[in-house]
Amino acid sequence: MATPTLDKTDKAEAGFADSPYITATFRIRRFNPEVSDEAQWQDFEILIDPKERVLDALHKIKWELDGTLTFRRSCAHGICGSDAMRINGKNRLACKTLIKDINPEKPITIEAIKGLTVLKDLVVDMDPFFQAYRDVMPFLITKGNEPTRERLQSPEDRERFDDTTKCILCAACTSSCPVFWNDGQYFGPAAIVNAHRFIFDSRDEGGEQRLEILNDRDGVWRCRTTFNCTDACPRGIEVTKAIQEVKRALITRRF
Amino acid sequence: MSTETPTSAIGDVEGVSLYDVDHPAPVIEPPRKRTGKTPKGSRTNFEMYAWLFMRLSGIVLVVLVIGHLLIQLVLDGGVSKIGFAFVAGRWASPFWQVWDLAMLWLAMLHGANGLRTVINDYAERDNTRFWLKMLLYTATVFTVLLGTLVIFTFDPNIR
């Protein structure tokens, strides 16, 4: 058990050519309302293996340098969607971003996702985001009696909405959308993706209600197809395509 | 510190922050954030028709405007030929009257709807939104009506 630790310190101190460690600067947007009303950038220089993730760097900073650094993370493996943040100007999950992939030679900027109230450092108020999610009714709606067996579906019908089932509600897409930045009343990509997941589900019968909601002033017609959401999605969901499919469904069902 | 400046009075005084655990600084809220009280939809298809109109009028306008620019600025001697007589000659034909009328209406409505979305996107306060849109609609209606009036009542023998 002691061997890896010993090995690690040896390499770090000796600084051999084959050492995996590099010095990287993390420039983090700090905000603490109990200290100041203004956010500011703070640089942390740490020795780290570039094959590690940005989340590991944040852990290292929090555990070894500055315990007041505040950020969300739960599973740390790209499933819970807690640690979406703006890394080098792009929304990503800190737990899925390797340091070597974002050029550690320059300072790596990390800030909270945009368009939501920053509560402290990298933690934002997610309530408006989840309110939009609730408003599209992201649950199965059916009529009639409950069946005695499971609701069956053909593989083709399942395939129709497969892409949008991958959403982990990390808010990377919604907080990358320029329309959402300027007007929080817009449902945002994540809510539309989750509506899409049920609108195109053959077992669901509430599609018309959801389409009605998204046909509104703050619904899909506010999308400007800038593709920021598709670029930001850590799950690789074609978000803009999903929004376009909802638009098409609205037009074809209205005419 | 020798002199007291007004800035030091509102900033940190001798390194003591104005904010602490019991008096946190105000957080910056995003514009028009969604809450449980956000009004439900108006249940009309207006936004869909507006969106469709932008696409369809855009396609038609490409033909109309490029044709217009070619005729006015490139073909047959270019811009130097344009004068009262040239306009009068063109508007003598119903075809060019309809062309110009369609261009006027489509371009004005297309532009007005585009600006409407820009105002919706960027104006944060409801009052600002309302008055900007009123200004926009007034200007649009005025221009469309005036243009239409001129196309239909144009008198080539005016003195």
Image (cartoon, rainbow, N blue to C red):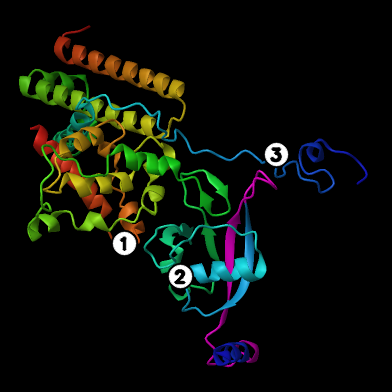
Indicate the amino acid at tag 1: Arg
Tell me where the magenta segment starts and ends, as one range.
A12-39
CA gap between label 3 and label 2 equals 38 Å
Mark drawn on residue A102: 2
Indicate the amino acid at tag 2: Ile
Counting other residues with Cα less than 10 Å from the Cα at mark 3, is it few (<14), some (14-19), or many (20 or more)? Answer: few
Q: Nearer the viewer, residue A73 or A213?
A: A73
- Compared across the picture, whether A177 is left or right of A164 comes to right
Does residue A41 sit above or below B90 in this rendering?
A: below
Counting other residues with Cα less than 10 Å from the Cα at mark 1, is it few (<14), some (14-19), or many (20 or more)? Answer: some
Considering the numbered disc 2 on the image, is that residue within a helix, a strand or a loop?
Answer: helix
Residue to which mark 1 is pinned: A235
User: x%, y% of residue B27?
Assistant: 59, 40
Q: Nearer the viewer, residue A53 or A16?
A: A53
Residue to which mark 3 is pinned: B23
Indicate the amino acid at tag 3: His
Counting residues from the N terminus, which is met first, the one under dot 2 or under dot 1?
2
User: x%, y% of residue B112?
Assistant: 29, 26
Instruction: Return the chain for callout 1.
Output: A
